[in-house]
Amino acid sequence: MTEYLLRVNGTPYKVVTHPMARLLDVLRNELQLTGTKEGCGEGECGACNVLMNGELVNSCLIPVAQADGAEIGTVEGLGDDERLHAVQQAFLECGGAQCGMCTPGMLVASAHLLGKNPKPDLLAIREGLNGNLCRCTGYMRIFEAVERAVSGVNEVGG
Amino acid sequence: MGQEKVVGKPMLRKEGVAKVRGRARYIDDLTMPGMLHGATVRSCIARGKILGIEFDDGIAWDQFVIVTATDIPGINEIAMINHDWPCLAAEIVNHPEEPIVLLAHPDRHMLPKAVAAVRILYEEWPAVFSIEESEQCDPVVWGEDNVFKSYLMEKGDVDTVWAQADRIVEGEYTTGAQEHLYFENNGAIATYSMEDGLTVWGSMQCPFYVHKSLVKMTGLAEEKVRIIQAETGGAFGGKEDYPSMIGAHAALLAMKSGRPVKLVYDRAEDMAATTKRHPSRIRHRTAVTRDGKLLGAEIEIALDGGAYSTLSSTVLSRSTIHAGGPYFWPNIRIRSKAFATNHPPYGAFRGFGAPQSLFAMERHMDHIAELLGMAPDELRRRNLLRPGQTTTTGQKIDEDIDLEHLMARAMAESDYETKRERFARENAAPGMKKKGIGLAAFLHGAGFTGSGERYLNSLVAVDATAEGKARVLVSSTEFGQGTNTILCQIAAETLGIDYDAVEMGPPDTSVVPNSGPTVASRTSMVVGKLVHSAALGLKKTLAASELLPWEGYTTDEFVAAVRTYIARYGILRAESHYEPPPGVLWDDEHYRGEAYAAYAWAVYVAEVTVDLTTWGVTVDDFVAVQEVGRVLNPVLATGQIEGGVAQGIGWALYEKVMWNRGRMENNQMTNYIIPTSQDIPPIRVFFEERPFGHGAYGAKGIGELPMDGPAPAILNAIAHATGKQFDCVPLLPEDMLRQTRVPQPEREVVAL
């Protein structure tokens, strides 16, 4: 067992665990941040996407030792009680979330995409989200949601 | 239609904020003090006798809770239609991954090693792994003849048509297994005490199915078993049957240990062990005139049902009834059988047998058209069902349908005729990329088949909370498709109040009445109608109390009146029982009559590019035109269609279960491929709204319909692009390559 320091959504945490514990399990089980979901456990589906030092990663593939000292961003860090993040609001309005299991990863990936490319066209959205599988929507509502978040219809949150 | 304020509007998903904030609580997000984690030891052979169970050294077995079939207090059975599906295999195993032993431990990391250290000793028996092997009865693995169920459905006198036919066209069509791949795996948590009885939380579609099954398995009194649905991350039919299994397993571990037990599968276990879509083999023989009039047909359906009968008889029933497609058949005979094999049992999956038989019908229509030298749309146009005609079960079409218009609209939206002609011309030129466009026309019956809704006899309640909100009480569950939202919309509209003033009751069998299972595209039409009547009852009670006028009040006035009523009388609640629409009569013995109270109708068009170098197929455009009665929520309805089309594309082109002696070998997302954001074409969805008189605000069923059309439309487009006929799904590049190397069978047997 080893001690690790993580900053998750701006809050510092000290975790004592096995160095090979998956970042996904540390978030969900040690920190009770269960918004991040496990879909496949092998880096295929993106349901467990979080930001690590600003990069989009599959938290099921990251041993906590690799995340020591890192800034982690999860779905719980998007928006707050006062106001949803623009992508959250757009997903809500456009029907981008159905069962909700791919949604946290899809939102983190969408926010990350908009951070890197504030005005992606449909092609860039399709490419930017190709690491995030969805079984419910057929992706159309998700593309529309990201486009709506881009178009500034919802100039809210951040 | 048109006057409503809430129904027909894109109201936001009730649980949407919780979902986008990551606050919705799914089963694996829940934990309890002192909770143990469970795991399952499964069969590694397809069929055989269990000779013994040994526990290897090197594991501190005294720290584990161990359950076998001998620990089952009641009947060792998962309650389905028949009584053949064991909760835990006791003496005989009939498929790989069949559960035999359950383990639980406080530390879930201790479980994999312990599972591997349980050694099951077997005497292995021969097994069958295909419809062909099963029908030869070599060996018999179920009952007397390996047949779970068979139907014979007849209309007219098909034996007289062959002599009148200008052409007789034969074809054989096959479809493969499909994995649901709901994003949340199956999971359950159980607690038990003598005083409180058994409580099971789980990811599920049908809380009362689980309740019924666990009462039987535990021997507990009905009121001592309580089932609560946790937020459920997708289902598509895959959580109709299996939650009774995993719920029973969690319950057995909790009852033996006296502690809460969580049993959640990982992806590999869920894919290998739980149910899938039934593979099929369907043969058509059709008599047709040279001007394209369908005179009659014989259709022979065979489904692989897997090792236990589960829901196969009802899946087969829906296959049988949908086999003739949306066409008028003066004469038809349909024989169908569901066969036992030693695969894990197949189960419910969106479409429930109809996608298989509609794939066959719609590919066959293109073959007939080609042989007649007729355009595929024209052949269909000459045979589409019209009001007043009868379906294959003899059900008279009372609805004011216009299928020709649906087809015309689908063709116009997709620019079908221009493209059909242009692609044919361009494909004649040299080049390795060929384009094609194809269509499929189909129908999907809403609600339980035949007398099913009468037997279900669903009950719904609407009550009011102390805060003055209306509350919908149903066992119909939300798993992504929008139950919460549309039922609240219906209640709000009926009560004449804001959508925000209505909430859903908890999906808990100790709180809600049994409104039936959440399956069969029945929620909008059947349960929605009951919510409508119950809400009307509540409104009448309030009006009779003179606390609120019948009309012309605000939501605030409603809330105030409800509060006063509850303060004065305690409870404000109204119930509604299912009553069949008039004239819905069904003969279960001969399979004749009103199979469904209503059908949804659709015409889909797919445009594809086939690369003849790689045999890769891309779907470039997809148009989905349908008539589902009134659309209750345009955003949710569009999402249902788009999602179903994407699953249909997956079934047609990507999703192949690789079997090895009954075991799924590619039980990972890495090698079982579903469409990604870059594989899906623009899916363009259009609704023709024709309100249905007996559904809630005119709604019919919608959820399963979009699964039926994509596969035949895509394969028809591939035939247009390549000039080659492929009659199986999934159709992967390697399948196309293999099939083009062998001569294709002659389809036409008689040309008079």
Image: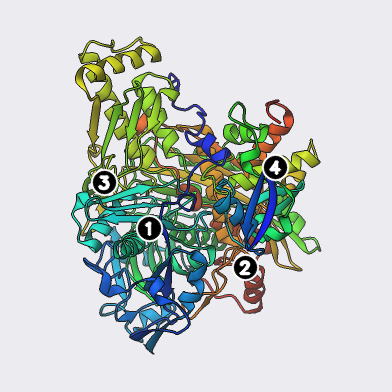
Q: Which residue lies under the disc numbered 4?
A: A110
Task: Report the Cα–Cα distance between label 3 and label 2.
Answer: 40 Å
**Secondary structure beneath disc 3?**
helix
Q: Give me the C-alpha separation between circle 3 and circle 4.
A: 43 Å
The CA span between labels 4 and 2 is 25 Å
Chain hosting mark 3: B
Q: Amino acid at mark 3?
A: Glu
Q: Position of residue B525 (x, y in %)?
A: 36, 38
Side (left or right) of B337 relative to A81: left
Q: Nearer the viewer, residue A2 or B436?
A: A2
Q: Secondary structure at mark 1?
A: helix
Q: Residue furthest bottom?
A: B123
Residue at x 51% of width, y 40% of height:
B406
Residue B469: % across, % down = 36, 23
- Using the image, tell me which numbered label, if any, was put on residue B453: 3
Residue B372 image position (x, y, % from top left) = 54, 60
* Residue B243 numbered tag: 1
Q: What whole-number distance in Å separates the C-alpha atoms at marks 1 and 4? A: 33 Å
Give the distance between the C-alpha atoms of the residues marked 3 and 1, in whole angstroms: 22 Å
Looking at the picture, do discs 4 and 2 lie on one chain? no
Mark 1 surroundings within 10 Å by alpha-carbon count, few (fewer than 14), some (14 through 19), many (20 or more): many
